[in-house]
Amino acid sequence: MSTEKGEKPLDKMTVKELRDVAKEIPEITGVHGMNKADLLDAIMKVQGIEAKPKAKPKAKAKKTDRDAKSLKKAIKAFRRKQAQAAKADDKKMAAIYRRKISRLKKKTRNAA
């Protein structure tokens, strides 16, 4: 992917440098209206250079059953703590535990 002059590779060039290269090639028209990707494609097509396909991004790892099981255990533990806080009339802690339970439930739904 380098130019004929032995300069740096085409994909490492700036848009301005690519325009200068493309202006020298008579087959390419509309150089100033092109963006970097278009310029690269046009120059490589004229020079007969094949574009290397980009590597596909890796898929996210799926959550395992262990994750769901550990989340469910945590939910049960927070429910017990919430019940204790409710018995002790600690509304603030009961609300905190309720929110934590809610967040964990969302995570279990995403893990499924």
Image (cartoon, helix red, strand yellow):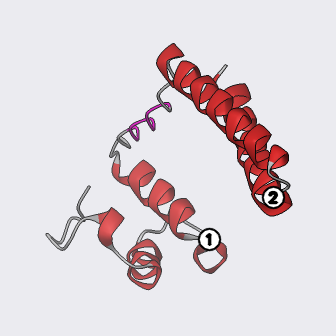
* Image location of residue 54, percent across then percent down: 40, 41
- Crowd rating for badge 1 (residues with CA inside 10 Å; few <14, some 14–19, many 20+): some
Q: Percent position (x, y) of residue 39? A: 51, 65
* Label at residue 90: 2
Secondary-structure class at tag 2: loop
Residue 52 position within the rendered picture, expressed as x and y whole percent measured from the top left: 35, 41
Q: Residue at x 44, y 35 (%)?
A: 56
Residue 56 magenta-drawn? Answer: yes
Q: Bounds of the magenta span?
A: 53-59
Q: Which label is found at residue 34? A: 1
Kind of residue at disc 2: Asp
The one nearer the camera, 109 or 28, is 109
Taken as a whole, is the magenta stretch helix, strand or loop? loop
Query: Magenta span has 104?
Result: no
Name the one closer to the observer, 5 or 56.
56
Q: Nearer the viewer, residue 103 or 88?
A: 88
**64 in relation to 10, above or below:** above
Residue at far top of view: 65
SS state under label 1: loop
- What type is the residue that disc 1 sits on? Met
Rendered residue at 73%/27% (across/down)? 109
Is 39 on the left-hand or right-hand side of 78?
left
Locate the C terminus by quadrant.
top right
The residue shown at (41%, 82%) is 20
Is there a contact, CB below 8 Å, between mark 2 and mark 1? no
Left or right of residue 39: residue 12:
left
- Which of discs 2 and 1 lies nearer the camera? The answer is 2
